[in-house]
Image (cartoon, grey):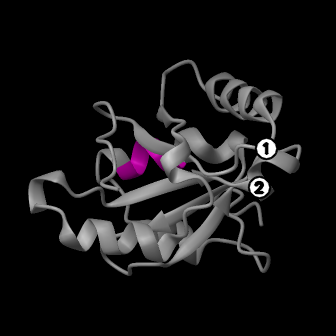
Amino acid sequence: MSLPQPDDLTSLVLRTDFGDEGAWESVRFALDAADEYPHATYVSELRFADVRAQALMAEEVAADEDEQVVYVFLADAVTMKDPVHPLLAVDLSDEPGRTFRVPARWFPDVSANLSIANMDFAEFADAADESGTFRGFGEG
């Protein structure tokens, strides 16, 4: 179950919940509307239904170095049900398994900085609030 490669300067958004097609469309719309530039490579394949971070980490360890994905955003059941569509960001490289949530509004900032390696995953995870959600720097 190797991960697809994201398009250049975008982040991989992997759909893991397939219960509501309309919710998936809402998530995609919210992410695309958050910024004028594309930041996501969307993957909606049933083989990733209910996949957990541990399974993704195992796949990445087994992948060739040039095919590894350093981080991924999961559109899981929480993402689909919550009106702010908080994706689950998963570190697959530096601290494998470390996660935080990022609402659609903040996704472009996180994606852009991670995709060009301007910031590390940990910087966003460390800035997450007590619920584990990144809501921008200094805005709690």
Identity, as a three-letter code, of the amino acid under mark 2:
Ala
Position of residue 109 measured from the top left corner of the image (x, y, whole percent) = 54, 44
Which residue sits at x=49%, y=49%? Answer: 47
Identity, as a three-letter code, of the amino acid under mark 1:
Gly
| Front residue of this view, candidates 12 and 126 | 12
Position of residue 52 measured from the top left corner of the image (x, y, whole percent) = 55, 69
Which residue sits at x=11%, y=62%? Answer: 65
Q: Give neighbour class at mark 2: few <14, some 14-19, many 20+ (Cα, 10 Å).
A: some
Picture quadrant where residue 130 is located:
bottom right
For label 2, the SS is: helix
Which residue sits at x=71%, y=40%? Answer: 105
- In this rendering, position of residue 82 left or right of residue 30: right
Residue that extends furthest to the front in the rendered view of this protein: 47
- In this rendering, position of residue 68 left or right of residue 39: left
Q: Give neighbour class at mark 1: few <14, some 14-19, many 20+ (Cα, 10 Å).
A: few
For label 1, the SS is: loop
Q: Which is more N-terminal, label 2 or label 1?
A: 1
Could you tell me if the residues under marks 1 and 2 are in contact, i.e. CB atoms within 8 Å? yes
Residue that extends furthest to the top in the rendered view of this protein: 36
**Which mark is on residue 41?**
none
**Which mark is on residue 19?**
1
- In this rendering, position of residue 91 left or right of residue 138: left
Q: Is residue 129 magenta?
A: no
Q: Is residue 63 above or below residue 85?
A: below
Q: Is residue 111 magenta?
A: yes
Picture quadrant where residue 138 is located:
bottom right
Which residue sits at x=46%, y=77%? Answer: 54
Identify residue for label 2.
Answer: 77
Quarter of the figure that contains the N terminus: bottom left
Magenta stretch bounds: 110-114
Position of residue 74 measured from the top left corner of the image (x, y, whole percent) = 58, 54
